[in-house]
Image (tube, rainbow, N blue to C red):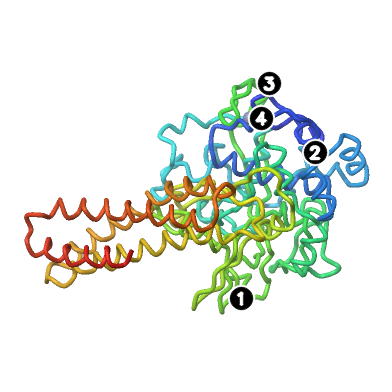
Amino acid sequence: MNLLKDDFISTNHGKVSLKTILITDTDYQLQYFFDEVQLAMLQLLSSLATAALQPTIAELRKYVSDGVTEEQYDNKLSGMNSEWFDSGNFMRSIPPEGAKNPEAPITKLLSGIECGTSSNAIGLFSEIQNAEVICPDCTHVLNYNLHMNIKGECFGPTGATGIRGGGAISTLISGDTLRQTILHNCIATDHFHDYAQLDSDSNEQPMWISRLDGQVYLAPKIGLIRGLFALAYHVSFPIENESCICHVCGQSSDQSVKRFFREKYKGSYGSTKTGRDAGAGWWPHPYTPRSIREDGTYAISARDQNWNSWQELSSYIVGKETDKALVEPAYIVRQYQELTNPRRTNLLIGGNIADQGSIVGRVYDLFSMPASLKKQHSKVTQVIDMGLAQKEYLSIALNKMFGIGYDKNFVSGIKEQAIDHFVSNAQQIIQKILLDVDRKEAAELRKDAIVELKREARKIYSGIQRKYQHDFPLFKALVRGEFILNKNN
Ligand SMILES: [Zn+2]
């Protein structure tokens, strides 16, 4: 099986190849049980399409507007080393002699599922039996996901941190069809080259072809294709000749995979403290927004279970400067601004919420983007600003509770719950308002945001007032706060 040529992608039309998705008009939809696998698959397919097509920005613009022909695809493939992407080779390097090669059930690859005795590995699925056996085709997406999206800590001492860092947020452009999505996230080689400032002699071969050596992996030496599939583990998946229904894609297969072996690489990328301190530098993964601080560059990751992506949306599309850090959008968002987008697209924000070795939540959010993000990004950022302002007013109003001599923990508990509640409900409100981003003017969107977010903040505030109406000191403080809430709108 070859990942650039053969059918390994599970869709609503059965298993198909990357080529078929790119050259036909059929509306394929990915079919995987877990949203994290869907997210990994979109990244994997766009990275594979980058390797296959290696387009310039001008070529990519044409592919996005007109599609890819079979002839174009085959021509591109004949000019590259497609055998690198044979299933026996792809992202699988041979571990050094004497390696321990710890074994684990395949369940463990679905990020952080409890399947051992460790207390520090909370699963997100109630039944681990739901993911015990997979087909050989799905080993690739799980392996890719391990390298790109799973935090090393989830494997304890045998875990390694990949090129993107642990548990990084991904931003992807999501089109109306799978083909549009893949092409929108395909990387234009010339454009990326200007952006990434890699060395002119950077290595373009994948790490399973040209070995990754040394203690420090210098970012400027890692070329685009090498970085898109950068390794952190030597991995192998023993294949058993036993038929199964795959627990990841749901398709039947003559062979099955239940376990995997991994051995981590010994050196460090600039995504780790060791690598950063040794001057490895940050490899600009095209799907990761980054935060540039005095002591180095970091991948943006989700903060805690109450985190909601809308709060950071502005920084993911135009960047944001605070006193401590400069947040920069992922490369893919910049590239998107250089493409013409005849169809509606969304920004997909996804990733894991990790707490040390545990995955405690997942993010998979879509926000509608204007057809021209370059000219009209303020349509989005103004809506987000309204949400953040409303959150701030709510916070100031609730602060009135602190002046009445009540136990501080009690009062901040009430406040925290109210703010979390607002942040979580604002997510849907903002997603809904942005659905009209191409139909309405900026001022109108802003007005919608003010009306609806204010209503939401007031609803939450009145709820608290009702709850404490018989607690006179608290109630009085809340009435004073209400004045602030009203005045500020
Ligand atoms: Zn499968």
Q: Amino acid at mark 1?
A: Asp
**Residue 22 badge:** none
- How far is disc 1 from disc 2 in space, using C-alphas? 38 Å
- How far is disc 2 from disc 3 in space, using C-alphas? 22 Å
The quadrant of the rendering that contains the C terminus is bottom left
Which dot, 1 or 2, sits closer to the camera?
Answer: 2
Percent across and percent down for residue 174 are 63, 45
Residue drawn at the location 58% of the way across and 63% of the way down: 299
Is disc 4's CB within 8 Å of ligand 1? yes
Q: Which residue is mark 1?
A: 277
Q: Residues within 10 Å of mark 1 (few under 14, many from 20)?
A: few
Q: Earlier in the sequence, mark 3 or mark 4?
A: 4
Q: Earlier in the sequence, mark 1 or mark 2?
A: 2
Indicate the secondary structure of the residue bearing disc 4.
strand
Indicate the secondary structure of the residue bearing disc 3.
loop
Indicate the secondary structure of the residue bearing disc 1.
helix
Q: Which residue is mark 3?
A: 254
Q: Are dots 3 and 1 in contact, CB under 8 Å?
A: no
Which dot, 2 or 3, sits closer to the camera?
Answer: 2
Q: Earlier in the sequence, mark 4 or mark 1?
A: 4
Q: Residues within 10 Å of mark 3 (few under 14, many from 20)?
A: few
Percent across and percent down for residue 110 are 54, 41
Q: Which residue is mark 4?
A: 10
The quadrant of the rendering that contains the N terminus is top right
Indicate the secondary structure of the residue bearing disc 2.
loop
Q: Amino acid at mark 2?
A: Leu
